Amino acid sequence: FVLLRIGWMAAATYAAALVVAKVANVPQTGVILTLGAVAILYTMLGGLRAVMWTDVVQFFVFTFTILIALWLVISKTGLGAGEIASRYAADRTDVLFDFSPSLTLAYGSWGLLLGSFLEGVSAFGADQVAVQRYLSARTERTAQTGAWLNLLGMWIVMPGLLAIGAGLAVYYAGHGEAVAADEALPTFVRFHFPPGMTGLFLAALLAAIMSSIDSGIHSVTTALVVDFRDRLLPQWKPDNDADDVRLIRTLVVLVGAVSVGLACFVGPLGNVFDIAKKTTAAFGGPLLAVFVLALFFPRSSVAGVFLGALAGAAVTFWLTFAKADWFSMWFWPAGFGLAMGIGLATSVLTRRREASALTWRGIVGQARRTDTAS
């Protein structure tokens, strides 16, 4: 989980900095460092309460800006929503839905369906960013309400972003402009948004990315303290709360610094979409496999789960470089499948026999059952 979330924060920071740098015409590295510093600072000072309440405010700012951006994109095309949808789909019959069984087909339907499903289940059921929020709720019902509200928010935000993308594709096609996918929105904002709206767009983008960074920093730090230090190295826990707080804040700074530093070097992995998937799949898929093995396969052994997760992560991480021509969403099923397969196989080979089976009566009884069956 720690590696998954650090990689995800690096990809998210890089993506936001790319847009801000393009719109504001400033150096991208400077944007990455500034975003990281601000997020680290208020996460360190405020803790979980600050992270969650700033996330709430940032969600409303981001949602409002999406609606305004969608209205501006539609108005610039001079077309209605129905016409935009029909023009967007007209030349993309084989792009919108393509179930060809190919690992190298970019945005193939099988890769998108399998990868998105596993990524979503992992995010809502195995990722500590979500789990820690469930556990911080006062009651189980409050946690359930929060999960449903999160899903509702996604159904507001994601269709809005998809509609903006379709509108931009139609707009640039109608004006004969060739723009890279990662630069389509920032270029449109820079040259076509009113001055005040440009500032609102940047504020919303910064809100969205800092919401992601602070959540990741807090959850990783909590995992390091509770799951590693307190369980495995309790002698490292300070004797008083003041020293403990200082140690935790130091961890916040270190986790944030590693994530921000990594964000400066992920650019060569591809476009923003590929970067996000390649930096998370190697660890997200095996993490989900650990939960599935624990919940639905009671005979799974500790050695099997551990070896499956480790081997799955290592092989998938190698695949992201060795199979660079694969569509990036396939790395999620690869990581999950490898971890599940190796975990189950190792569990069978290392399964402990019940103590009763090792007694004289157990051995004789098993021998008699074998003779009867034969």
Image (cartoon, rainbow, N blue to C red):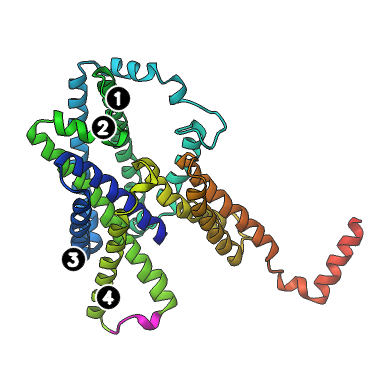
Q: Residue furthest left?
A: 196
Residue 208 horizontal/vertical position (percent): 23, 46
> Which mark's residue is nearer the viewer, 4 or 1?
1
The answer to whether marks 4 and 3 mark residues whose Cβ atoms lie closer than 8 Å is: no
Q: Could you give the CA–CA distance between mark 4 and mark 1, rounded to whole angstroms? A: 49 Å
Q: Could you give the CA–CA distance between mark 1 and mark 3, rounded to whole angstroms? A: 42 Å
Q: Could you give the CA–CA distance between mark 1 and mark 2, rounded to whole angstroms? A: 8 Å
Residue 49 is drawn in which quadrant?
bottom left
Q: Reading the chain from its start, which is encountered first: label 1 or label 2?
A: 1
Residue 45 horizontal/vertical position (percent): 18, 65
Residue corresponding to mark 2: 184
Residue 315 horizontal/vertical position (percent): 54, 55
Part of the protein shown in magenta: 234-239
Q: Reading the chain from its start, which is encountered first: label 3 or label 2?
A: 3
Mark 4 surroundings: few (<14), some (14-19) or many (≥20) residues within 10 A: some
Residue corresponding to mark 1: 169
